[in-house]
Image: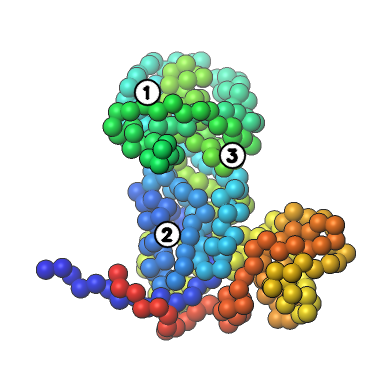
């Protein structure tokens, strides 16, 4: 007999929770778990983080989902460990070893590692791995890979903003390189580790991956899933930060009550603002985030707007654990 299904009273939650995603969880698994813990009506994440990776995963709720694309496009920083001497079918520890080669540790001098780091810094081309979620004819590449089918993949341009390569050991005591990399959207760290292994002449595959920063949001502001589960609802809600935390690189503009109303209606406003591609717009009374836009030729042009209901709910503050919402059966 099936266990009784849990009835959850969903409620509006607006803001961002920085999760230190655990190993073994997909980004969506982690999102759905936290959404359930908060009883939030609407949620979204800011780009996938592999189940084999841990680290910073901003989760957006309610009005904050309107700005999640900003984090998707942001530069990200990772710490990775790639074991030298073996390549695998997936470029990480989940795959089968397809080739083994000796590792000449005496040749892994700091100078050589620095030269390899320079080789893979700046704009580079990467061939996406077959074991990835990229799609061909509506089917994910990893599905073809599981069927033993190799699909031709064009190289894609990515940017490695910063890269440090040093000699280390992995958790099993095997020779490895540690990579500290800040990169653009679309970079595959597995592929980077594999390519660096080839450049060193011995091959490599990833054994450890942790994201430490995304768009200026670092581990210091994160909470673990285990810690969230141990909290009561009121404590969990304290970890939800205002939506504007995603807009720290936007130029702030504050509008009068009159102009704020017109802006929220989608109307352009004129002022003495300098041109700016990214503006966070606030109302003066009450002080509240209205949305984002850009300034061109003295005109403030709306791009993404909050609804009056979202603004009202944010101004009323974090929902209380007893707040009612949509009844949902899980």
Residue at 47% across / 20% down in the picture? Answer: 198
Residue 62 location (% of width, % of height): 52, 69
Helix, strand or loop at mark 1: strand
| Residue 220 numbered mark, or none | none
User: Does residue 8 sit above or below 130 in this rendering?
Assistant: below
Q: Quadrant of residue 121?
A: top right
- Depth check, mark 1 against mark 2: the one in front is 2
Q: Residue furthest right?
A: 272
Q: Which residue is mark 2?
A: 31
Q: Is residue 217 above or below residue 120?
A: below
Q: Quadrant of the N terminus?
A: bottom left
Q: Earlier in the sequence, mark 2 or mark 3?
A: 2
Disc 3 crowd rating (10 Å Cα; few below 14, some 14-19, many 20+) is many
**Which is nearer the N-term, disc 3 or disc 1?**
1
The numbered disc on residue 86 is 1
User: Alpha carbon of mark 1 to alpha carbon of mark 2: how far?
Assistant: 34 Å
Q: Name the residue beneath numbered marker 3.
A: 183
Question: Is residue 226 visible to us here?
Answer: yes
Q: Is residue 52 above or below residue 194?
A: below
Tag nearer the camera, 3 or 1:
3
Compare residues 81 and 35 and report the one nearer the observer: 35
Is residue 222 among the parts visible in the rendering? no
Q: Tell whether label 1 touches label 3 (CB within 8 Å).
A: no
Residue 91 locus on image (x, y percent): 40, 30
Secondary structure at numbered mark 2: helix
**Is 164 in front, or is 267?**
267
* Residue at left offset 52%, top offset 54%: 46
The Cα atoms of the two marked residues, 2 and 3, are separated by 24 Å
Distance between mark 3 and mark 1 Cα atoms: 25 Å
Q: Nearer the viewer, residue 133 or 244?
A: 133
Furthest toward the left, the residue is 1
């Amino acid at each position: 007999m099936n266990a009784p299904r849990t009835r959850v009273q969903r409620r509006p939650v607006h803001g961002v929770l920085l999760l230190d995603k655990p190993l073994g969880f997909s980004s969506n698994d982690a999102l759905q778990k936290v959404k359930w813990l908060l009883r939030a009506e609407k949620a979204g994440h800011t780009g996938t983080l592999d189940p084999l990776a841990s680290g910073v995963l901003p989760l957006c709720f309610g009005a904050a989902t309107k700005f999640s694309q900003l984090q998707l496009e942001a530069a990200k920083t990772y710490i990775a460990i790639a074991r030298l001497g073996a390549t695998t079918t997936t470029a990480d520890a989940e795959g089968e070893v397809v080739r083994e080669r000796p590792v000449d540790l005496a040749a892994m001098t700091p100078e050589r590692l620095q030269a390899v780091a320079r080789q893979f810094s700046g704009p580079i081309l990467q061939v996406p791995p077959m074991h990835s979620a990229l799609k061909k004819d509506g089917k994910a590449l990893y599905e073809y890979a599981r069927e033993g089918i190799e699909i031709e993949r064009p190289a894609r341009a990515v940017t490695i903003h910063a890269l440090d390569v040093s000699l280390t050991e992995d958790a099993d005591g095997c020779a490895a390189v540690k990579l500290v990399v800040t990169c653009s959207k679309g970079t595959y760290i597995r592929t980077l580790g594999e390519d660096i292994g080839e450049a060193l002449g011995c091959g490599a595959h990833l054994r450890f991956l942790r994201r430490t920063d995304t768009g200026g949001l670092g581990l210091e502001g994160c909470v673990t899933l285990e810690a969230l589960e141990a909290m009561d609802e009121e404590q969990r809600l304290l970890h939800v930060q205002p939506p504007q935390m995603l807009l720290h690189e936007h130029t702030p503009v504050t509008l009068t009550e009159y102009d704020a109303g017109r802006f929220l209606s989608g109307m352009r406003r004129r002022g003495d603002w300098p041109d700016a591609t990214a503006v966070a717009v606030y109302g003066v009374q009450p002080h509240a985030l209205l949305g984002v836009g850009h300034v061109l030729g003295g005109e403030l042009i709306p791009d993404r707007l909050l609804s009056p209901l979202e603004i009202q709910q944010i101004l009323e503050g974090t929902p209380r654990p007893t707040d009612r919402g949509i009844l949902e059966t899980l």
